[in-house]
Amino acid sequence: MNRSTFSISKIIFVVTIFSIAMGIMEGAVVVYLRKIYYPGGFEFPLIPIGPKIAITEIIREAATLIMLISTGIIAGRTKTERFGFFIFCFGVWDITYYLVLYFILGWPQSLLTWDILFLIPVTWVGPVLGPVINSLSMILLALLVSYFTTKNPLAKVNSKEWALLVIGSLIVIVSYTEDYVGYMLGEFSLMELLIPTNSNEVMDYAIGYVPQHFAWWVFGLGQGIIFLAIFLFYFRKR
């Protein structure tokens, strides 16, 4: 994209509007689902849903990621810029999603309210505050990337910073999945979970899951490593 005819500020404005629109659409879908399955308000344990709806939800999540990634690819000139616009869109979309649910449903009641965050490859759960912090850190890094690549299109995240971002992200994912995985492994072995003939029994047990503990120290460690990568990138490019 030619920055001489379409300034970076206009690009950021357009992808922001797109991400907000996606967040509103995503929130609307969840409003419909909760009206159908949780008319009295969303809470754990989950209400059973049909396999077609479950598969549709997984496909919807995958499609959402593809749309966000595609936006980054279209908006950026280099791999670093494309990554920056992708995480910017992700952060704005995610925060907008929670704002929509709050203003329409009055949910979450607080930033410590538990939520299902993702279903791929296993269920991710955590207090709403977690993904909000993740989203804000994404937006911060994305704006720094945009600022420095505007000054120098060849500016990029180096290998050390990439390593820290990946490691930190993986640790954060562990914090979101360890409680659910521990619940499932308390009843089934890993092999039993992978056997297709056990799917009905596994699903019946999974539906009874109620979050008990969020490993804030694991989350804090992962998010701290991510912030370290962001600070290293900023001071190196400054």
Image: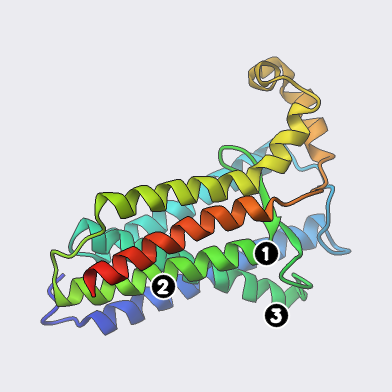
Tell me where residue 96 sits by quadrant.
Answer: bottom right
Q: Badge 3: few (under 14), some or many (20 or more) residues near its Cα, within 10 Å?
A: few
Q: Residue 152, relative to residue 55: is it above or below?
A: below
Indicate the position of residue 48 as horizontal and vertical percent values. 80, 42
14 left or right of 176 in image: left
Q: Which residue is mark 3?
A: 103
Residue 145 appearing in the image: no
Indicate the position of residue 168 as horizontal and vertical percent values. 47, 51
Q: Earlier in the sequence, mark 1 or mark 3?
A: 3
Q: Say which mark, if any, is on residue 140.
A: 2
Q: CA distance from mark 2 to mark 3?
A: 25 Å
> What residue type is disc 2 on?
Leu
The quarter in which the C terminus is drawn is: bottom left
> What residue type is disc 1 on?
Val
Q: CA distance from mark 1 to mark 2?
A: 19 Å
**Which secondary structure, mark 1?**
loop
Q: Residue at x 18, y 65 (%)?
A: 155
The label nearer to you, 1 versus 2, is 2
Which residue is nearer to you in this view: 79 or 11?
79
The quarter in which the N terminus is drawn is: bottom left
Residue 5 appearing in the image: yes
The label nearer to you, 2 versus 3, is 2
